[in-house]
Amino acid sequence: MQQNLVRAEGREVAKWCLAASAVWMAVVMTIGFIASLQMLFPGLNDISWLSFVRLRVIHVNGVLFAFLTMAYLGAIYYLVPKLTGGKLPEGVAKASFWLLNGIVVLAVLSFLSGRTEGREYAELPRPLDLLVVVFWVMMTYAAFKTVLTGTEKRWYVTLWFFLQSIIWLGFCYLVGMVPLGGIADSVALWAYGHGVLNGWFQTMALGILYWVIPVTIGRPVFSHVLSLIHFWALVVLMFPGSNHHLIQAPIPEWLKFVTIAFSVGMLLPASIFFTNMFQSLKGNWYQLRRSDTDGLALKFAVAGVTFYLLNCIFAAIQSIRPVNAFIHATQWVVGHAHMAVIGVSAIPTLALIYAAMRRLTGQEVPSLRLGHLHFWLTVIGYIGVIATLKIAGIVQGIHRAASIPFEQTMDTMRIFYATRSFFGLLLVIGAWICTYLVVKWFLIKPVPERVTELESLERQAIAVH
Amino acid sequence: MGKYWLWGFVYIAILLICAFALTLPPVFQKVEPTEYGKLTDLEKQGLRVYLREGCYYCHTMMVHTDKTDAEYWGMGRESKVGDYTTFEPNALGSQRIGPDLTYVADRVPEDDDWWIRRITDPRSITPTSIMPPFKHLSQQDLRALIAFLKSRKNPEMKQVEGEKWSE
């Protein structure tokens, strides 16, 4: 009983984080949709504050920090106390939530007025960079304080992933913050730019999947040992692959070799993960047909695992040199960015939002029908967007190989931009549906008895054997 | 508990070793700037405008080292490390929504009016362009940006032209 009282502290903050994340998700995805329309109707760029370059920065940073990081913050404050049995320092946790929201608002204002560092993925101006560092220190303090007061002797794999992601985020952010000169700047920038995707946006999502799938199907993962092997293989292999963005840049040849070898090597941890996940789902596929909140969360989680498999295969192939020479600087790259961020990070995060909101409030999703509509809009929109962009990239690559002038390529791209905007619209409609559901959920009165009941059901699924 | 902290330290050590091994050698590598890489103060200011306005989201400033650009598209000399020594920070770009600008000055008119119109009202020159109009730039910023872009010339091309002249 004591432990349940202790854990209850994290729930309130987590609920706020997930609701805020859902609201930001709809906002920043709408901004991305408007930016995609600007590529079709250049007249929309006439107001300088709302031109493509400024909306694009807000879209990219917004998805990464306002939507995903906010949800991950909720995941940390909800799951770390649960998995360690520790006591979350509530004041610090709440303060870090408000600080992150403050950073997002200030960042939007500074991007709209054109104040950026001018480095892709590291656009935040210096004062805001420092606020992010303060935020990171608070989050780290809250998480590790919980771990230190924890009573659990054996750590579930989700906890491993979360703690390494927290350390990694701070480390990567510091590397990316410091502008250097020349090519060294690119090397450091992509060490951050891809390192943060690998080590924060990907690994947090993996930790989330390791929690969502067992608790929604009500059975533990196939092998906990295998999941720990996955974890260690991933952390050892993940960093040196970061520079595969620079295979076409004049960086030293040995660095290109290392980065390609490690990028392809990432298939190893990925295949361990799929073995583990699909073995866990074996005999449980019928649960995808369940029509309840957990069934919906499971659908998102299984979609996440599948898209992650697809993404890893693509990622390994496109870092090989001849392929890379063909697709570099084409729309393929944009396609891959969406493939990774939506498929690997956002869809598992949506699974978390549905599974966690049920356990945080003790209430079912306000409308299961709308939830399913959100799922199908997301999946169809996602596949549409990435397929369009990848085909566009291949066409652009063929044009380059056939020595077709660039002006002609630009005209050919229009049809792809239009298709992308259409599928993007489906994603945006899905996002607003999700926001509506989560805000409604957030406002319903929680049922504490049901919360306790669900928690005790969950314990056997995430027990470490 | 102790066992976990030990693992934590091992892990952080691996992380730092990887970081140092991969990031720092190129950082300390001193490379002389090539002719392309020498920027005047005004051009450096122009580079900052180029980055601040986000030009690099749609334009690259790099010719691929893997032959595709140089051989098929005839973009000319491949980019070299020395090209970017004075670029702080870099402007390589990652995406070609618009054309590559590495040697842009070689293929467009020289006069400033053309440049000003192309930047502040792109569709008055290229009707199909989807570039945003950068009307909000101050005179000073515009001057610096144009100076920077006009200096983006292929150094090898100039030599070839020089030879032609001497003939």
Image: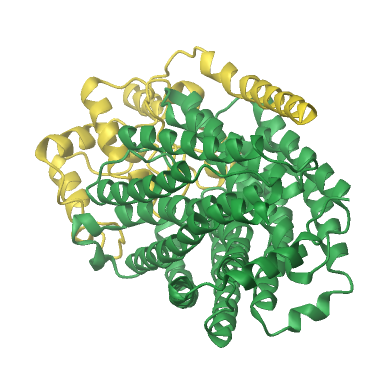
Residue positioned 57% across, 65% down in the render:
A360
Image coordinates for residue B57, horizontal then vertical, percent? 39, 48
Please tell me in which quadrant of the rendered image residue A96 appears: top left
| Lateral position of residue B70 relative to residue A134, left or right | right
Image coordinates for residue A213, horizontal then vertical, percent? 74, 64
Depth check: give the residue in front, B132 or B124. B132
Residue extending farthest left: B139
Specify the colour of chain A. green
Q: Could you tell me how many numbered marks the image carries? A: 0
Depth check: give the residue in front, A209 or B29. A209
Residue positioned 38% across, 24% down in the render:
B36
Residue extending farthest front: A1
| Lateral position of residue A259 relative to residue A56, left or right | right
Image coordinates for residue A459, horizontal then vertical, percent? 77, 60
Residue positioned 81% across, 61% down in the render:
A460
**Residue B96 shows up from this direction:** no
Above/below status of B92 relative to A418: above
Q: Looking at the image, what colour scheme do you see? A: by chain
**Quadrant for the N terminus of chain A in the image:** bottom right
Specify the colour of chain B. yellow
**Residue A388 shows up from this direction:** yes
| Lateral position of residue B39 relative to residue B79, left or right | left
Residue extending farthest bottom: A369
Residue positioned 62% across, 20% down in the render:
B20
Above/below status of A25 relative to B80: below
Image coordinates for residue A152, horizontal then vertical, percent? 75, 43
